[in-house]
Image: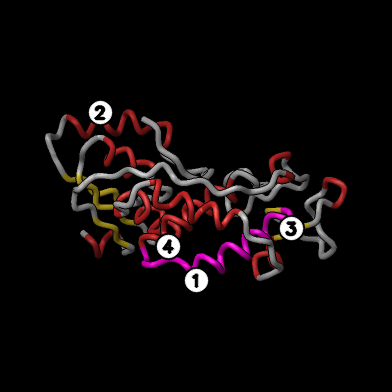
């Protein structure tokens, strides 16, 4: 079953078919994904017809879950918004200051001796788009869909191995590409899915 998410060392992507098969034997209609991470399991459960309660302590996971579980607006609604964001001129901001690097002859190690995750042309787009999302998003769910699109786009031009400390010393070939946002693969239904950001032991 197709799902989408960022590169992540602990992703459950490959075991989703086995998870779904095991759950089918339980004859349940609602499933708690207690450590949802990139939400691939939550996405698959929703596609399979379950009502999903998704939980994770991380804010980025909550954003993904709101995008894939709670949003009910169709892709056509987001297409012109994302087209607008893609056309924004880049600007130097916080992300460029802390995470952007120059091509530097192929080395991601910058003048301060530290490796960078993205090249500066992409962090400048990130800075501009991130600021604009704050200005134009009409509600938290819409904001989560746009942020999900942004995270997916930046994941495609990063220079890592899918772990928060695994920055590559030499720029990955994809890092030279220009990031481009796309509408996430939204899953629309009318079920009462819920998203939590709690300690799992307090939730259950």
Q: Residue at x 83, y 45 (%)?
A: 106
Q: Residues within 10 Å of mark 4 (few under 14, many from 20)?
A: some
Whole-percent x and y of residue 52?
A: 24, 48
Among the two numbered marks 2 and 3 on one chain, the one whose residue lies closer to the N terminus: 2
Among the two numbered marks 4 and 3 on one chain, the one whose residue lies closer to the N terminus: 3
Whole-percent x and y of residue 22?
A: 23, 31
- The residue to which callout 2 is attached is 21
Q: What is the spatial separation of the Cα atoms under label 2 and label 3, in whole angstroms?
A: 44 Å
- The residue to which callout 1 is attached is 135
Q: Residues within 10 Å of mark 1 (few under 14, many from 20)?
A: few
Magenta-drawn segment: 119-140
Q: What is the spatial separation of the Cα atoms under label 4 and label 3, in whole angstroms?
A: 24 Å
Tag nearer the camera, 4 or 1 = 1
Tag nearer the camera, 4 or 3 = 4
- The residue to which callout 3 is attached is 120
Tag nearer the camera, 2 or 4 = 4
Tag nearer the camera, 2 or 3 = 3
**Viewer-side residue, 94 vs 201:** 94
Tag nearer the camera, 1 or 3 = 1
- The residue to which callout 4 is attached is 143
Q: Residue at x 68, y 50 (%)?
A: 167
At mark 3, the secondary structure is: helix
At mark 1, the secondary structure is: helix
Among the two numbered marks 2 and 4 on one chain, the one whose residue lies closer to the N terminus: 2
């Amino acid at each position: 079953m197709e799902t989408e998410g960022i590169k992540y060392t602990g992703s459950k992507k490959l075991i989703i078919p086995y998870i779904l098969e095991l759950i089918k034997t339980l004859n349940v209609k609602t499933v708690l994904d207690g450590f949802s991470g990139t939400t691939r399991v939550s996405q698959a459960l929703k596609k399979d017809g379950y009502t999903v309660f998704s939980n994770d302590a991380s804010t980025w996971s909550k954003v993904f879950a709101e995008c894939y579980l709670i949003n009910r607006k169709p892709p056509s609604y987001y297409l012109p918004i994302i087209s607008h964001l893609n056309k924004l001129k880049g600007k130097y901001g916080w992300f460029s200051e802390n995470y952007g690097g120059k091509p530097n002859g192929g080395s991601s190690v910058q003048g301060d001796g530290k490796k960078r995750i993205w090249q500066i042309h992409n962090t400048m787009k990130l800075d501009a788009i991130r600021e604009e999302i704050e200005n134009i998003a009409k509600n938290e769910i819409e904001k989560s869909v746009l942020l999900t699109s942004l995270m997916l786009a930046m994941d495609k031009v990063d220079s890592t191995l899918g772990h928060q400390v695994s920055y590559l010393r030499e720029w990955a070939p994809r890092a030279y590409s220009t990031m481009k946002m796309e509408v996430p693969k939204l899953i629309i239904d009318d079920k009462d899915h819920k998203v939590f950001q709690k300690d799992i032991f307090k939730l259950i």
